[in-house]
Image (cartoon, rainbow, N blue to C red):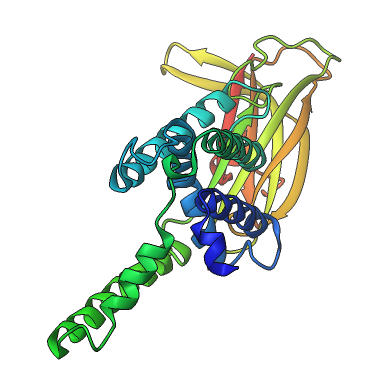
Amino acid sequence: MYTALFEASTADLTVALVWLAASILAIYLPVLNESSVRVVLTLPVILFLPGYCLIAALFSKEDDIDLIERIALSFGLSIAVVSLIGLCLNFTPWGIRLDPLVISLTLFTMAMILIAKYRRMLLLRGQRFRFPFSEIASMIRNSFNPHEKSRVDRILTIVLSLSILIAVLTTIYVIAVPKEGERFTEFFILGEQQKAADYPDHIVVGEQYPLYIGIGNHEYRSVTYMIRTYGMLMKFDNTTNTSRIMSMDPLWQHSLTLAHNETAIIPYNLSVEKSGYNRIEFLLFNETGPDPAMNSSDLINASYRDLHISV
C-alpha cells in the first residue's frame, strides 16, 4: 500500500495537500504554534508549495519540463504568487493579516492541486507526470549499500549526508530560535477601513470618527501599555519659529497587556466635546503612567511613543 501510494501519478499532489493541512494545524493549534514545528511546516508553504502546485497545473505531462526545472521554477513562482496575493489583500478590507493570508494561500494551492489532478487524469497513464519518489528512495538506499561501494565511498556518503542534515537542522534552529534583536514597540493609527489612510481632517463636536490604534510588542517580555488621546490647540510663534501648545485636553485612555510578539488592534471612536482643536495627539506609555502634574510638553516627552493627526 505504501509503495502504491507513492507510485501513483498524483502522489506529489497528495503529499502537497497533506503538508498544507499540517501547516494550517501548526499555525492554529496552541501546542504547535509556539514551537519550531510551525516554522518547519509553514516555510515550504510560503517558499515552495504554491509555485510547485501552479507548475503541476500548467505542465501535467511527464516530458513538458524536467524535474530540476520544476523544482527551480517552484521556488521563484512561489515568491511571486505570495507577493501578488499580499498585494491584492492590501487593497481589500481585510488587509495583509495572518487569517486572510492563510485562507488565500490555502484556496490558491488547493485550486492548483485540483486543476493539476484533473489535467493529469485526462492524459494516458504513461504521459502523466509522476514525481520519482521510489527512484529517489532507491538511490539513497544504494548510496549506503556496503556491497556496491568501497569503504572510502561509504565514509564520504555518510559525511556528506551528515553535513546536509546538520545544515538543515542549523537553518531550522536559526529561523525557529532567532537571536534576540532590537527591542521595540510598534504604535500606529489606521483609518476607518483599517488602512493607513482616510484619517479625519475636520472634526465636528459630538460626532464620532472611527479609527483603529495598533500596538505591537517586540520587547521580548510582556508589557502593560496605556494609550491616551488628547485634543490640542497649537499656534505657530513667528518670533521663535516654533509651535506652542495653547491647550491640551484629555479625550480617552485605555490600558492593555501584550505578550512578546503579540499585536492588538483597538477600535477607537474619536469624539470631542468642544471645538478649537487643530491636532489630536496619541500617546503610548509602557509600564508606568505619566505624572499628573506634568505640563503638556513634558507629558509628550515622557511618552514611550507618540503620534498625531492634524484636524
Q: In the visual, does 128 lie left or right of 144?
A: right
Q: Is residue 153 above or below residue 255?
A: below
- Is residue 295 visible in this depiction of the protein? no
**Residue nearest the viewer, comparing 104 with 14:** 14
Q: In the visual, does 174 lie left or right of 236?
A: left
Q: Where's the C terminus, which quadrant?
A: top right
| Residue occupying image coordinates x 67% and y 29% | 94
**Residue nearest the viewer, comparing 284 with 160:** 160
**Measured from the top left, where is residue 86 in percent x and y?**
52, 31
Q: Is residue 299 above or below residue 207?
A: below
**Measured from the top left, where is residue 15 in percent x and y?**
55, 55
| Residue occupying image coordinates x 56% and y 46% | 304
Q: Where's the N terminus, which quadrant?
A: bottom right
Instruction: Kindly indicate the quadrant of the structure image that contains residue 186.
Output: top right
| Residue occupying image coordinates x 67% and y 41% | 99
Q: Is residue 40 above or below residue 291?
A: below
- Is residue 264 visible in this depiction of the protein? yes
The total number of labels drawn is 0
**Measured from the top left, where is residue 159 in percent x and y?**
22, 81
Instruction: Kindly indicate the quadrant of the structure image that contains residue 238.
Output: top left
**Measured from the top left, where is residue 193 in percent x and y?**
69, 22
**Residue nearest the viewer, comparing 20 with 36:** 20
Q: In the visual, does 97 lie left or right of 126?
A: right
